[in-house]
Image (cartoon, grey):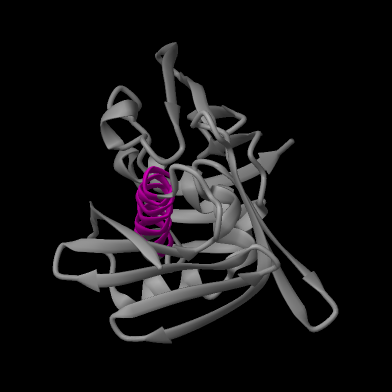
């Protein structure tokens, strides 16, 4: 069996990690490559596809997952062999490992390194945002209120919406009566933010993926207080 590992910064706790990882149908589609999970009767099927390399990598298998602090493990068993994605939540970092026994697969090491890095980054970012926003959001994933909102939370709200709605493209609006902002996301890329207040309006061009954006991308927006958030297609 061949394996590759990757490390990414991680600031969330174990409960936030499990809260995200225990929903593979939600977290797999956030990976920065084609990935999804579907339920077929009692079976859970995972499908991955990477077209970054000369020889594309595709894998489909029955998914099983386990949690044993600090480890999260996804095991996929398919007709082509075995693929495992495992994560260890250590102090300040998440160590992701992709391991596979797939006979005849070319450039497997490079593909596993790419799988580990992408899955690790996504799981870390989604868990961090889930841990920050879930306790503050009141309502449904597409219509909720956040109290004590501030600009540094906006990147986390965008990831929270992505994880909980499954939408790669959406428009998020936030209002507090006198101010309003609109975030436009297309195919997983935060394109821009429009901001309106009594003193005028502005547009911030972002152009970064949901996994990459942070508070610095929204630093020019002075959004504070209680905001009503709405998500639409």
The secondary structure making up most of the magenta span is: helix
Identified at 37% across, 35% down, the residue is 223
Residue 144 coordinates in the image, percent (x, y): 60, 55
| Quadrant in which residue 131 is drawn | bottom left
Seen in the image, is 120 located left or right of residue 187? left
Task: Quadrant for the N terminus, please.
Answer: bottom left
Identified at 65% across, 62% down, the residue is 80
The outermost residue toward the bottom is 68
Residue 85 coordinates in the image, percent (x, y): 44, 66
Q: Say how many tags the image has.
A: 0
Range of the magenta residues?
109-130
Residue 114 magenta-highlighted: yes
In the image shown, does 44 or 52 lie closer to the viewer? 52
In the image shown, does 171 or 73 lie closer to the viewer? 73
Task: Quadrant for the C terminus, please.
Answer: top right
The outermost residue toward the right is 41
Q: Is residue 68 above or below residue 100?
A: below
């Amino acid at each position: 069996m061949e394996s590759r590992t990757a490390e990414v910064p991680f600031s969330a706790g174990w409960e936030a990690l499990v809260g995200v990882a225990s929903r593979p149908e939600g977290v797999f589609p956030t990976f920065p490559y084609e990935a999804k999970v579907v339920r077929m009767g009692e079976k859970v099927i995972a499908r991955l596809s990477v077209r970054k390399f000369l020889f594309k990598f595709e894998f489909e298998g029955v998914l099983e997952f386990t949690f044993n602090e600090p480890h999260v493990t996804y095991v996929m068993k398919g007709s082509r062999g075995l693929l495992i994605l495992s994560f260890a939540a250590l102090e300040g970092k998440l160590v992701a490992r992709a391991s596979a026994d797939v006979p005849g697969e070319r450039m497997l090491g490079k593909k596993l390194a790419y799988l580990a890095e992408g899955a690790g980054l996504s799981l870390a970012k989604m868990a961090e945002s889930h841990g920050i926003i879930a306790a503050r959001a009141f309502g449904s994933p597409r219509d909720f209120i956040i109290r004590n909102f501030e600009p540094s939370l906006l990147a986390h709200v965008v990831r929270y919406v992505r994880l909980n709605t499954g939408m790669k493209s959406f428009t998020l609006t936030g209002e507090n009566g006198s101010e309003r902002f609109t975030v436009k996301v297309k195919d997983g890329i935060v394109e821009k933010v429009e901001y309106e207040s009594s003193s005028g309006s502005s547009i911030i061009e972002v152009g970064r993926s949901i996994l990459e954006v942070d508070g610095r991308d929204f630093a020019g927006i002075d959004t504070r207080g209680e905001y009503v958030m709405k998500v639409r297609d």
